[in-house]
Amino acid sequence: MGLGYSVPPTADDRIVKAMQTFNLKVKDVAVMWAMFKKHDKTRGGIIGISSFYSDILFVPRTIFCDGLFDLIEAADSEAIDFGEFVAAVTTYCFFEIPEVLKFCFFVFDRDKKGFITQEEMRLFVDAMHGNEMSTNVEFALDNLKYRKDGKFDFEEFKVMHHLYPSVLFPAFRLQNAMMMAMGGERFWENKKLALSMQKEDERKKEANREARERAEAYKYREDQVRRHMGGIKYYLIPKNRAKYYEVYPLPKKYRLLEEQAKADAKREKQLAEMRKKQKAAQ
């Protein structure tokens, strides 16, 4: 690659996607490039997956770890290029707790059927812990409550993590090792915070835009009805407006929202009446 190897290669689709998705800057990619090229001994543009774990993250490679490269759909099961490296690192470092749990479940659920069997649970937890499960982890697995069919779905998986966090601890240790190797934990926490704030700003802008559009739709309808009825009747006989609302309907999405609101109000009224009857019967 010559002298050009000192700077990151031209961004491929994976790098562009990561930069857009996680709001990364060129200098952020350069941090990952510095680590990648350090371990690309042949300057061939690839590093071994085993080296990624042993020489960069200093964690043992397991079938659980390899699930990360299944997730990003790496082309080779033994080596990755820089685009795959960036995709793997950014994806996992930006995971919050719910995403880490979903990833663990994705790896454990080998057949992607939406549940884990007892056999799969023990197999992958044992692999996560390097075939050296602690007494606490053994205790947790022995006390998990499976359904009668011996299966474990994602909701039960989340409860397990809440009750026995030591079971999935290696998944979070892997994330921490990745953060520390590529910029440090504070670097990634600041990146996640900035991305969260950006998404919140975008959500607020979208909510404000939607509120404006809705207000404009209602105003347009009222203007049409008032023009049709005449100002005096519109203000003095408001009950007559309803029939004109059928002539000048709201856009479909707002009609559906109104229908849902009416249905919710009706259901709440029914529930209130039921509670009242139950209280009177006591």
Image (tube, grey):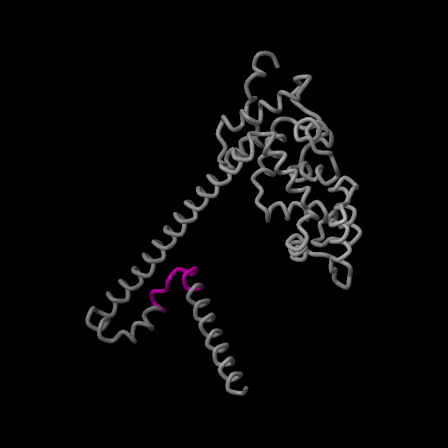
- Residue 21 seen in the figure: no
- Residue 30 seen in the figure: yes
| Residue 164: percent from left, percent from top | 68, 52
Q: On the image, which quarter does residue 158 sit in?
A: bottom right
Q: On the image, which quarter does residue 42 sit in?
A: top right
State the residue at coordinates (56%, 32%): 184
**The magenta stretch spans which residues?**
246-256
Q: Quadrant of the C terminus?
A: bottom right
In depth, the one of 74 and 132 nearer the eye is 132
Image height check: is 265 above or below 84?
A: below
In the image: residue 205, left or right of residue 157: left
State the residue at coordinates (58%, 24%): 33
Image height check: is 256 above or below 238?
A: above
Number of numbered markers:
0
Residue 66 part of the magenta-drawn span: no
State the residue at coordinates (22%, 75%): 236
| Residue 36: percent from left, percent from top | 62, 24
